Image (cartoon, rainbow, N blue to C red):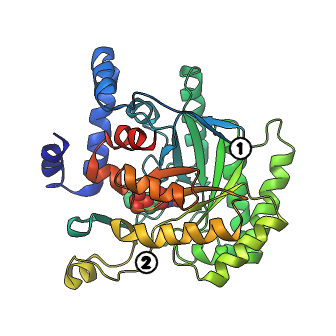
Amino acid sequence: MYKLIRRILFAFDPEKVHYFSMNMLRMLCKIPLLKLLFKKIVAPKNNHPVTFFNLTFSNRIGIGAGFDKNARYLTELETIGFGFVEIGTVTPKAQEGNEKPRLFRLQKDKALINRMGFNNEGAEKIAKRLANWRKRNIDSKMIIGGNIGKNKSTPNEEAWKDYEICFNLLHDYVDYFVVNVSSPNTPGLRELQEKNSLLNIFTVLQAANRIKKLPKPILLKISPDLSHQQINDIIELTTEINIDGLIVSNTTINRENLRTSAEKINNIGAGGLSGFPLQKISTEMLDYVYKKTNGGLVLIGSGGIFNGAEAMEKIKAGASLIQIWTGFIYEGPSIVKKINKHLS
Ligand SMILES: Cc1cc2nc3c(=O)[nH]c(=O)nc-3n(C[C@H](O)[C@H](O)[C@H](O)COP(=O)(O)O)c2cc1C
């Protein structure tokens, strides 16, 4: 059924289709009977809750950051059955992001290239929306993560201020935080993965966290393009300062071994590649980090998961939780149910 829907959806601009589909889903979820029916069809039947950093996830499957940047579709994503949703990347000030088009499908590779550039409505507005949603959904068990970043106009030396602003504004409404320094679409951002910059950002966030009534776990999302030396530096850092976990990984700038023609790839231009071509490198990185840390960190596996077997690969490589994004676009909403069935 989804294959047919996908054929139609894939005939249109990827970014427009994304919002169109989610808005359609929102309309459907407003009609209780249709919502129930949809839930019955797509949502997992038997969840096996898991607990990490004192948070209970109804299942291990989350939607990755960038899918619901502004926390607009929480009800719809909960209806589909995600155990957790990571909103953002949120920046202090609202920003438009890069010029369109900025999202491209590579169908032959089951992949996407995006250079969105942190388009979002800004931390204050998003915090208000989250507060309202929390008020209206007190019974919800879905875990919400807040993925935070810096504005394009903020120089790297002052980046810590942006992370701190987002952290304080969102703190009451999210269950965990992710420091995103690994998106390839904000110039210079990935330089913040260097040890001193991370030390700076995490020291500030942990100080802010300590004085909150309910401190929240803070994770770091890393790029699959880091060298082993850079990963080792980050792992060393996790022993010096408190980093609760790592998301492995963000999108890659690598364009090797693609089936899509070189001409098409060239025409698309810069951006982060996600989906199937990212699967192997992100799983290898996960495996490397897991072994280096002796399983001492909570790891979230992200990159190229399309089915239960591939989710299991991430778990075998050391992931406690997994996130999907491109797989959702290619496989449709029942992907959560299918993966959940396989994992249980
Ligand atoms: C269109 C698009 C936008 C994204 N935006 C963000 C973002 O704002 N912040 C972030 O940390 N990751 C972002 N990501 C990366 C995903 O969260 C995920 O880590 C990556 O796509 C790898 O997973 P996948 O292969 O399942 O897509 C984005 C990915 C896509 C495709």
List x then y, in percent, for residue 71.
49, 40
List x then y, in percent, for residue 106.
25, 68
The image shows residue 72, relative to residue 111, as above or below, that is above
Q: In the image, what residue occupies the spot 49% across and 53% down?
A: 65
Number of on-image labels: 2
Give neighbour class at mark 1: few <14, some 14-19, many 20+ (Cα, 10 Å): few
Q: Quadrant of ligand 1?
A: bottom left
Q: In the image, what residue occupies the spot 48% across and 51% down?
A: 323
What kind of residue is marked 2? Answer: Ile
Does residue 291 appear left or right of residue 262 in this picture? right
The image shows residue 49, relative to residue 97, as above or below, that is above
- Residue 183 visible in the displayed image: yes
Does residue 120 appear left or right of residue 44 in this picture? right
What kind of residue is marked 1? Answer: Phe
Q: Nearer the viewer, residue 33 or 201?
A: 33
Q: In the image, what residue occupies the spot 57% across and 39% down?
A: 144
Q: Which callout, 2 or 1, points at the residue further toward the start of the chain?
A: 1
Residue position marked by numbered label 1 in the rendering: 53
Does residue 249 appear left or right of residue 229 in this picture? left
Secondary structure beneath disc 1?
loop
Residue position marked by numbered label 2 in the rendering: 253
Q: In the image, what residue occupies the spot 84% across and 67% down?
A: 240
The label nearer to you, 2 versus 1, is 1
List x then y, in percent, for residue 107.
21, 65
List x then y, in percent, for residue 298.
66, 54
